[in-house]
Image: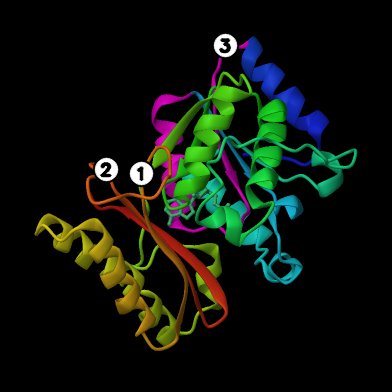
Amino acid sequence: MKILETAAEMNAFSANAMAKGYNIAFVPTMGALHEGHLSLVEQGKRENHLVVVSVFVNPTQFNNPKDLEKYPRTFEQDRKMLLEVGVDAMFYPSVNEVYPTEAKSTYDLDGLDNYMEGPNRPGHFNGVVQVVTRLFDLVQPTKALFGEKDFQQLAIMKHMSRKLGYNVEIVGCPTIREESGLAKSSRNVRLSTKGEQTAANIYRVLNDLKQSLKGGLPTSKARQKAIEELNKTAGLDLEYFELVDPESLKPCNDDSEHIQGCVAAYVESVRLIDNMRLK
Ligand code: AMP
């Protein structure tokens, strides 16, 4: 596995791959890797010649400086995991390599950031689009793999990649969970055992809601019921619970045919997000 630290090295790797007629599957990450990230790598390996994984904690997508500061950084462990799973190149650039000039671009996300993460994390998705497109320019992938765990991010990247004219297929991959049901996340290392048990209620409530909707409970009542359940969970501080259309991300009503349940909550000061297709 090659470790590439500069934009020039990354460019040279991609140019060489292209000259050989190889295509690149790309997995952008912020490191502190776990099985969720590795499942994206496995999926990428299935149909592509080469897999490149970037490990870059992107400052422009953090609206909270404390969150950026506390974000886990585990280079050596990440390197070993990627080596074991058989990645061709790990791209590990510095901030200056990714943003040689000040990162100022602003994007019109066509309203996909009006709900959920958007209002709660101002500037977050602008930063995500900025870094992912910059990485696309450097890595030159034919496919990029994203987790459904970050559901709104996946929807925005599908839309923006098309809108900005990138010829990159955006592939969504299922959420990998702990045994408790908690969605795996780099942030989970900051939870105590008790905290993890508390956080697992998010998955439980999503599952229960799916059953309630199957049983014919109207959408508005279902949303209210889930909010009440989460609010009465000791140690869990709910930020939002929304039922949205999986493509437009607009709130559902009682007639909606497709429903995605999306949650953000704090447990032990750790911000957790999760989602599930409910209908
Ligand atoms: P991050 O390092 O958190 O920015 O995540 C990098 C990529 O891994 C994103 O596309 C995430 O959606 C994806 N990812 C994170 N956690 C999981 C998970 N539990 N299951 C599947 N994909 C995940």
- Residue carrying label 1: 245
Name the residue rendered at 52%, 31% in the picture: 159
Binning the other alpha carbons within 10 Å of mark 1 as few (below 14), some (14 to 19) or many (20 upward) gives some
Residue 81 position in % (x across, y down): 53, 53
Range of the magenta residues?
20-48
Name the residue rendered at 35%, 61% in the picture: 177
Residue 269 position in % (x across, y down): 57, 80
Name the residue rendered at 30%, 78% in the picture: 229
Judged left or right of residue 272, residue 174 is: left
Name the residue rendered at 78%, 37% in the picture: 105
Q: Secondary structure at mark 3?
A: loop
For residue 261, which quarter of the picture?
bottom left
Binning the other alpha carbons within 10 Å of mark 2 as few (below 14), some (14 to 19) or many (20 upward) gives some
Comes first in the chain, label 2 or label 3: 3
Mark 2–mark 1 CB contact (< 8 Å): yes
Distance Cα–Cα, label 2 vs label 3: 40 Å
- Residue carrying label 2: 258
Comes first in the chain, label 3 or label 1: 3
Q: Nearer the viewer, residue 79 or 230?
A: 230
Amino acid type assigned to the residue bearing label 1 in the image: Asp
Q: Nearer the viewer, residue 277 or 173?
A: 277
- Residue carrying label 3: 21
